[in-house]
Structures are given as C-alpha cells and as structure tokens.
Image (spheres, coloured by chain):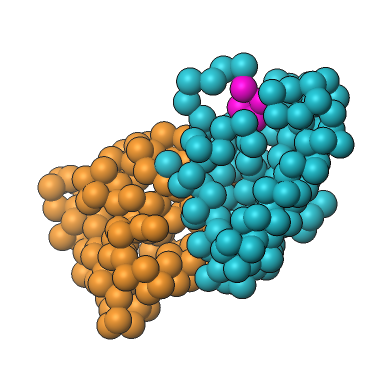
Chain colours: A cyan, B orange
C-alpha cells in the first residue's frame, strides 16, 4: 500500500517522538516500505550539530542504527532551512516530494519547546500535503 | 498501535472514501483492532431522535457487505448539524477510538473545504488521525 514513508525527526528531542517513530517503523515494516527520517537544521550551530554537514552525519547514523535494529530499509534526509520558524512546513513538504514519499507519519506537536527547531504544524501539513498524513498523538 | 479505529464515511459516496476504508480495514485486521464506522448524516428527519433509526439499517447493510467476518465492526450514526469536524471528534471520544482514519472527500470537487475538514479533525481530535489520500 505504501512504498516510501517519511517521518520528521528532531534529533534533540527523540525521546518525545517515541510514539511517532514507533508508528512509522511499524507501518514501514508492515508495508515493506522504505522509511526516511527527515531532519531539519539551520546554517547556524544548534544544540545537535555545529554545521549542516555534522547534522547530516548524525541523522545518517541515527537512521542506520534504527534500520539495523528494526530490520527495515531506513534512510536519512536532512534539509537546511534558512528560517525554520517561517519555512519549515513548506520545506518539509518539498522534501516529502523529493523523496517520493506516499505517507508521512508525524507527531501532532512537541509540547513545551517553543523555540524548538521542528515546531512543525501537523495540521498544516495534513491540509496541504497531496499524500497521506498520519498525525500521531 | 490502534485498538479501536474510527472510520467516518459518507454512505452517499462510499467510492470517494475507498482509500480510507481500505487503509482502516487493513490496520484493523493487522492489529486486531475494532473498526467503528461512523456516518455523519444530514438530519433529514424532522425529529433528530429518529436519525439513527433512519440511517442505521443502510449503514449495517454497507458494513455487512463490505467487511469480512474476521474483523469486529461497529456502526454509528450522528447527525450533521453543520459541524462534521466536531461530530467526528466527539464520536471518537465517545466510542473510545485511539485512531481516526479519514478520507478527503472528492478532492477535485471540493478541495479546500474537505481538506480543511480532515485537517481540522487532525488538529482537534484527542487521538491520532490518519488523513488518507
């Protein structure tokens, strides 16, 4: 039913995304789909990485570890957002298109972190994406 | 994964909800979840109290014809008083659904409205929501 599943991930708060990550992995396994961990970073240093290159490496390592542990085809896709507060949702949509995702699994929101990089709006994504969106609570 | 899935459909155009129905059926079977099929129907009857009686037979017929016996299916009807999003969210809480699987109704005809319905449910529901396209 689904071939490429995308799950936005924030490496700084993986512990708060457990349910979304589990759901995505579960569905990837069930459908034999490729699972893309999509991470967003900025040009400027963050708590996760000093540079986009370092961020990309960390995300790739994360995906590789998950893929081995879960026995699924897991890949990483990092995107550099110039102004995540403004552009992140659109950047994510563009990335979903680039990787040819047919399903997005994402947490509804991550509570308590306002300055948070991935403060993406699942509702906005759900209304603007042309593909299926699974909002996890 | 889900134990009870709410599947809102419109029985006047089940074909438009085909992908959502397929996805919900597949999940229900895979996880042994109960499927609660919901029809938010226009209150044609003068007396709203008679609404379920009016619509339930048709919904039961649809459910019996569409789903195999290996999954547990419930049929629910609620009146659409102009705010289907609210009805769907309330129904989810009432039947104890932990996931709503929702189609986007006829994207060509009424794109903005129906996208926003599904998106509103995705925003307002107390449980997970799968918007199926």
| Quadrant of residue B11 within the rendered picture | bottom left
How far from the left and from the top, in percent, is residue A39?
Answer: 71, 40
Q: Is residue A66 left or right of residue B103?
A: right
How far from the left and from the top, in percent, is residue A2?
Answer: 62, 67
Q: Is A56 rendered above or below residue B3? A: above
Which residue is rendered at x = 47% and y = 41% of the image? B122
Which residue is rendered at x = 38% and y = 74% of the image? B29
Q: Is residue A44 visible?
A: yes
Q: Is residue B82 left or right of residue B119?
A: left
Q: Is A130 rendered above or below residue B65? A: above
For the record, the magenta segment spans A116-120
Q: Is residue B3 left or right of residue A125?
A: left
Q: Quadrant of the N terminus of chain A?
A: bottom right
Q: Is residue B111 left or right of residue A50?
A: left
Q: Nearer the viewer, residue B89 or A95?
A: A95
Q: Is residue A120 visible?
A: no
| Quadrant of residue B21 within the rendered picture | bottom left
Q: Is B116 rendered above or below residue B51? A: above
Judged from this view, the residue extending furthest toward the top is A115
Q: Is A11 rendered above or below residue B20? A: above
């Amino acid at each position: 039913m689904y071939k490429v599943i995308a799950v936005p991930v924030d490496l700084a708060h993986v512990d708060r995304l457990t349910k979304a990550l589990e759901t995505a992995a579960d569905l990837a396994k069930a459908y034999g789909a490729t699972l893309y961990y999509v991470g967003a970073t900025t040009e400027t240093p963050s708590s996760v990485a000093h540079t986009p290159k370092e961020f990309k490496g960390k995300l790739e390592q994360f995906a590789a570890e998950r893929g081995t542990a879960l026995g699924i085809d897991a890949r990483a896709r990092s995107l550099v957002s110039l102004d995540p507060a403004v552009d992140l949702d659109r950047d994510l949509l563009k990335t979903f298109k680039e990787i040819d995702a047919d399903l997005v699994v994402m947490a509804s929101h991550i509570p308590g972190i306002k300055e948070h990089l991935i403060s993406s709006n699942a509702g906005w994504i759900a209304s603007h994406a042309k593909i299926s969106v699974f909002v996890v609570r | 994964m889900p134990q009870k899935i709410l599947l809102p459909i419109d029985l006047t155009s089940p074909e438009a909800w085909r992908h959502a129905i397929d996805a919900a059926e597949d999940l229900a079977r895979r996880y042994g979840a109960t499927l609660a099929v919901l029809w938010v129907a226009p209150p044609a009857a003068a007396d709203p109290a008679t609404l379920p009686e009016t619509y339930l037979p048709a919904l039961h017929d649809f459910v019996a014809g569409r789903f195999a016996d290996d999954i547990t299916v419930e049929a629910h009807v609620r009146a659409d008083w102009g705010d289907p999003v609210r009805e769907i969210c309330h129904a989810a809480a009432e039947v104890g659904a932990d996931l709503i699987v929702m189609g986007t109704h006829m994207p060509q005809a009424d794109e903005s409205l129906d996208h926003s319905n599904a998106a509103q449910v995705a925003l307002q529901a107390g449980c997970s929501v799968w918007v199926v396209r």
